[in-house]
């Protein structure tokens, strides 16, 4: 699995000579041809370490888990630090919440709710 900072970085990697050489080298070692899947947006919040879900969870599940992370976090941050944050420009406050969501809360919420987001089906192992 590869993650890229932005679409331009992905495009540059896909067109690179290095990638073409690596693919040529490893294809003969694979049991079946390699597959490519591109995900973006909120779906990338809902991935488990070392696993790239073939099918993302249903949108309603992603919405509920996002809400369970965002609402209490924003409420708590504003209760604890509201007066201090009132002095910080709105864009900076928003960026702080987004960093908290993306790098702290959502990875944990995805692990904690993985049983519900990615239920195991009979004959399926993760």
Image (cartoon, rainbow, N blue to C red):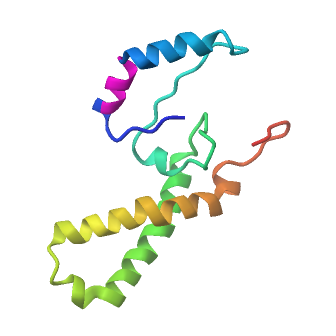
Residue 55 in magenta stretch: no
Magenta stretch bounds: 9-15
Q: Nearer the viewer, residue 33 or 65?
A: 33
User: Residue 14 appears at what percent x and percent y?
Assistant: 39, 21
Q: Nearer the viewer, residue 70 or 4?
A: 4
- Give the answer, above or below, for where 52 lies relative to 28: below
Whether residue 67 is visible: no
Locate residue 71 relative to residue 32 in the image: left or right: left
- Give the answer, above or below, for where 9 lies relative to 35: below
Q: Main secondary structure of the magenta part?
A: helix
Locate residue 77 relative to residue 63 in the image: left or right: left
Residue 14 in magenta stretch: yes
Locate residue 123 relative to residue 20 in the image: left or right: right
Query: Which residue corresponds to the image point at 39% horizontal and 44% vertical from the top-left?
Result: 41
Whether residue 6 is visible: yes
Classify residue 91 by image quadrant.
Answer: bottom left
Query: Which residue corresponds to the image point at 52% horizontal and 53% vertical from the top-left?
Result: 62
User: Residue 77 appears at what percent x and percent y?
Assistant: 36, 81
- The N terminus sits in image quarter: top right
User: Residue 96 appears at what percent x and percent y?
Assistant: 30, 69
């Amino acid at each position: 699995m590869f993650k890229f900072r932005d679409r331009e970085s992905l495009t540059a990697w896909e067109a690179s000579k290095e990638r073409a050489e690596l693919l040529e080298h490893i294809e003969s070692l694979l049991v079946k041809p390699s597959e490519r899947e591109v995900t973006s947006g909120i779906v990338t919040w809902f991935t488990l370490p070392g696993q790239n879900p073939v099918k993302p969870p249903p949108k309603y599940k992603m919405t509920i888990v996002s809400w369970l992370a965002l609402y209490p976090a924003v409420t708590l941050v504003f209760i604890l630090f509201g007066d201090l944050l009132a002095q910080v420009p709105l864009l900076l406050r928003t960026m702080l919440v987004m960093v908290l969501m993306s790098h702290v809360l959502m990875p944990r919420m995805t692990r904690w709710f993985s049983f519900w987001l990615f239920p195991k089906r009979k004959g399926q192992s993760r």
